[in-house]
Image: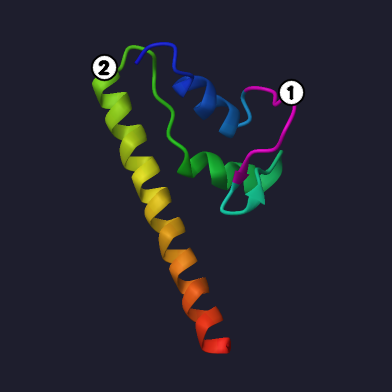
Amino acid sequence: PSGGGKSTLCRTINRLETIDRGIIRFDGRPLPEEGSALARLRSEVGMFGSRVSSAIVVAVIYIGLSMALSALAHRLEQRSRSTAIAE
């Protein structure tokens, strides 16, 4: 949907927009501000032009969020198992 902030989010993650306040964390760590770590991050975060069909953009964001949530659920499950074993 138009005006939802999709491009702004991608531009902010890529450090093309200034973060006025707060912290964006990826995989539990603050986003890198410069250097090789930022270059690595940029290679993993896709950007798209504003002429791309909204349906495609929404699908890509949905897939990306689904993958991130799946990875998070997997990590939480592993932590839960390791905690149960320790007890």
Q: Amino acid at mark 1?
A: Asp
43 versus 3 height, above or below: below
Percent position of residue 87, x then y: 58, 88
Q: Quadrant of residue 53?
A: top left
Q: Quadrant of residue 13?
A: top right
Q: Amino acid at mark 2?
A: Ser
Q: Which residue is mark 1?
A: 20
User: Which region is colored magenta?
Assistant: 17-25
**Magenta-colored stretch includes residue 2:** no
The residue positioned 43% from the left and 34% from the top of the image is 46
The residue positioned 36% from the left and 33% from the top of the image is 61
| Secondary structure mainly formed by the magenta segment | loop
The residue positioned 56% from the left and 53% from the top of the image is 27
Percent position of residue 43, x then y: 49, 42
Q: Which residue is mark 2?
A: 53
Label 2: which secondary element: loop
